Image (spheres, rainbow, N blue to C red):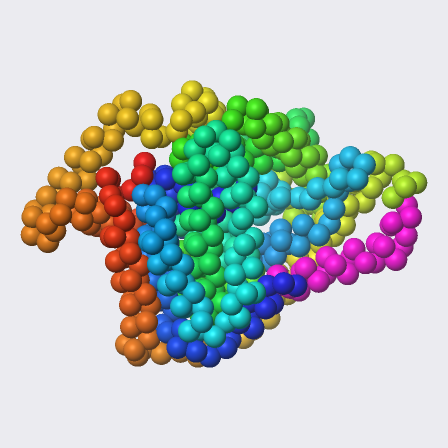
Amino acid sequence: MHIPDGFLTTPLWLSLDVVSVPVVGWCGRRAQAGTDESKAPLLGLMGAFVFAAQMINFPVAPGTSSHLLGAALLAFTVGPAAAVVVMTAVLSLQALVFQDGGLLALGANVFNMAVCGVLAGYLPYRYWGAGRLRRAAVFLGGALSVFVAATLAITELLLSGIRIPGAALGASLLVFAVSALIEGTITVAVLEALERINPSWVETRPGQARPAMGLLALASVVLVTVGVLFASAAPDGLEKLAVRAGINERARALMETPLAGYEVAFFSGSWAAKAGAGLVGLALAGALGWALARVIGRRRRV
Amino acid sequence: MHHVVLDEWSRRTSPVHRAEPRGKLLGALAFLVCVATAPRIEVPQFGGYLLLVLAGISLAKLPVVPVIARAAVVLPFSGVFAVMSAVAGDTDRAMAVVVKSYVSALAVLLLVATTPLPRLLRAAERLGAPRMVIVVVQFLYRYLFVISEQAQHMRQAARCRGELARRRSAGWRARFRAAAGALAVLFGRSYERAAAIHQAMLARGFDGRIRSLAPPAGSATGWWLPAAAALVAVAIRLAHRMEFPWPL
């Protein structure tokens, strides 16, 4: 599910953009850590592979077929940090060239599919990938990568105040569950075929990944569970919830206080003042994310 | 493949094509922010946004109808949620998601149809996007067609070997495993191609950065057009009636 622009409420897309840039920057450095050789060619070709994989159809039921989505498979082969980078590259290209997903919503889509999807898919593999339960871990990883990403997307839409009737919500969760099972099955089949061709393509000792990755993965799964409960408890979205909690009033106060002096100086009408303050606040938040990405990204060259 | 047309559009010449890529990227983002934060759909304002993008499209000498049709790929997604919102009684929201997503898609399309992707990525890198991601996107775009063509060849080869006839006779399990095997082979070929490409690039002095032959022109004139467009968008945005800077 690629969310286009115009769907998410401003605090949501803005905060997910601000979160995603440094996380992806950090994953880029982690993917490159430990080797002198540039990993960029391999990761680029893996992205092209994910695109091309859409052409190979897997039979699902008579008359229907599905294809690999790939987040979990990438995590098991090139590692979770590199998989985050590959999926981010795939989503960026889809947003730019294929109009699949918005540009402002890119942070949200990256967060759902590239960060949480990949890490949630990697979670079972990290703990059970080496032992007896390997096959189950691979299956569960493939399934989780799809289910977590899709559920996060629908949660964000609900939080943005998009009304989804209960029946439709149930139906879409069911569809997500079925696609998750299909992705799990495809991931197991492809990974086993890969191991038969060349075992060195597959990460065999997953327990050695950094504990930070495991924690992040766990956090993303917990986030989804909490998110679904939260969204189903508050079906009217952030708006009603904010009103109920008085956040709206507080947000106004917060928005206007640091810019109070400017309001008097530059704007006379109250609506212009609010709009101006809002846009300046938006620019400040964007600048903060940019600066954060710069500081984190500067320490090492690709 | 249908995005080849985008490559052709982005290599034409016009004032919009000649504008500074960083300026166009920032201008497009400013436009998208104005549209995304608009509190409600008001006809004059959204007419203004639409006219602004259409002016850009005609100034760029792009074929108007194909561009308008191409941006419509967002409509199925928006339509589903618009219908759901409308059924739930929130027609304002239904209207907003369709209009906002379409106008935004049109603006992004104008950006990528007037800037060749390598130059756009370079602009994003200079504006502070994570470089690792930028380099990976460059490789991905360069080899997307190669790998896709390989997948097509493999599919055609499978058909030559009687895949379609076997569909009826072979069991589900066998077909599933055949597809998995094909995908594993495609993975292996991509993996090995990456190693060969990397070695060839190292031999030519690759150090992890992709350099472009045409150095970005440093003229200030290229900034005027996107800056003016962004200012118009902000002006339209300020003309919205307001209760809070954006709807929560």
Quadrant in the picture for residue A18: top left
Total marks drawn? Answer: 0
Quadrant in the picture for residue A49: bottom right
Instruction: Say above or below: A65 vs B190.
Output: above
Q: Residue at x 13, y 39 (%)?
A: A257
Identify which residue, A131 or B59, lies in the foreground.
B59
Q: Is residue B156 magenta?
A: yes
Q: Residue at x 48, y 34 (%)?
A: B85
Q: Is residue B199 visible?
A: no
Q: Residue at x 39, y 29 (%)?
A: A237
Q: x, y (%) of residue B199?
A: 59, 67
Q: x, y (%) of residue B172?
A: 83, 36
Identify which residue, B165 or A266, lies in the foreground.
A266
Q: Main secondary structure of the magenta part?
A: helix
Q: Residue at x 35, y 30 (%)?
A: A238
Identify which residue, A106 or A250, lies in the foreground.
A250
What span is in magenta? Answer: B142-166
Instruction: Say above or below: A56 vs A176.
Output: below
Quadrant occupied by the C terminus of chain B: top left
Q: Is residue A296 magenta?
A: no
